[in-house]
Image: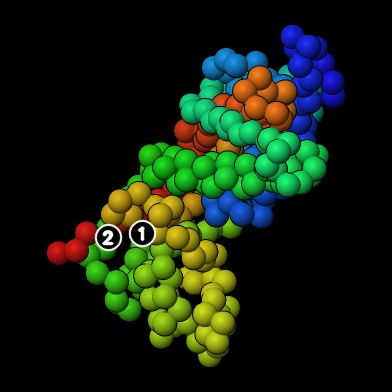
Amino acid sequence: MPATNNNQSVRTFQPQFKELLQAVYQKQAYFRDFFGGSIQAEDGVSNNAKAFSLKTSDIPMVITKGTVDSDENRAYKTDANTAFGTGTGNSTRFGPRKEIIYTDTDVNYSWDWVFHEGIDRATVNNGFEDAAADRLELQAQAKTQMFDDQGGTFISKIAGKTENITEITNDSVLALFNKLSSIYVNLQTIGEKKAWVNAELYNAIIDHPLTTSSKSSSANIDENNILHFKGFEIQETPDAKFQEGEIAYTSIKNIARQFTGINTARTIESEDFDGVALQGAGMAGEFILEDNKAAVVKVTLKKA
């Protein structure tokens, strides 16, 4: 879109870059399931600290448990003077009502990003439109990797629990996933469990005696992949995505959000060469409800 900038042409690409970021993130980010499957992106934002206001509720689902041996002990009261008779209009058979209120929670940015490239008419050997489109695609891929690395750092930082093993063997891997499974059972979590594991741990799971068709394991040894182990969806993840000494992260899917605000994505005629500068800048961050941190576990390898 042309604009006036000291007689220099400007074209903005914020909406296009937003779509590229979201599409690439969904395909290439290892931790996308942790953050709900996609990145929340806004284009044309002002450069400030506040990212979004989220509607959140810290009130859990409440289920009142009772016995049916007598009306006095039942959760659902059926005596004649509850909601009827003398209790008409001033009582209810469902028990106390708890009001559900959603709270506006301000979420702040925690880090920023930028790119600055040049497309010179004398050297680009391609059309400006094609060159700009290619570079925006590559920048989206690069930023997605940046978001993913930040995501791993965030998961490590907010993990509610740490489990340690001293070696990777059949026995230690089995003991680890039995322990992890019991953690989520005792937390009474709702949702699908996922484990992001490094290459060494992944191969140990693939080669584990339990990973056989006779055990109804969803594995394909010929293709060296496994979908589930001990109730966890398993995803092989590069070592570089983990913090030092860490080999796995586990959580329930979709318990956090990752977001970015795009301040600018544009081409502008350059005074320094015969062509345009391709520029972009934005801010980003991550958010998780405090209660959800208990459902995030990181695994460390500290050899004895």
Residue 86 seen from this side: no
- Which numbered circle lies on residue 247? 1
Quarter occupied by residue 119: top right
Quarter occupied by residue 79: top right
Q: Is residue 89 above or below residue 209?
A: above
- Residue drawn at x 24%, y 69% is 167
Q: Is residue 193 above or below residue 274?
A: below
Q: Which residue is mark 2?
A: 301
Category of crowding for the residue at label 1, using alpha-carbon neighbours closer than 10 angstroms: few (below 14), some (14–19), many (at least 20)? many
Question: Does the residue at mark 2 contact the one at mark 1 (Cβ under 8 Å)?
Answer: yes
User: Could you tell me residue 210's position as x and y percent?
Assistant: 44, 83
Quarter occupied by residue 159: top left
- Residue drawn at x 54%, y 47% is 145
Q: Quadrant of the C terminus?
A: bottom left
**Residue closest to the eye, 91 or 236:** 236
User: Could you tell me residue 181's position as x and y percent?
Assistant: 43, 62
User: Could you tell me residue 168's position as x and y percent?
Assistant: 29, 71
Tell me which amino acid carries mark 1: Ile
**Residue closest to the eye, 28 or 116:** 116
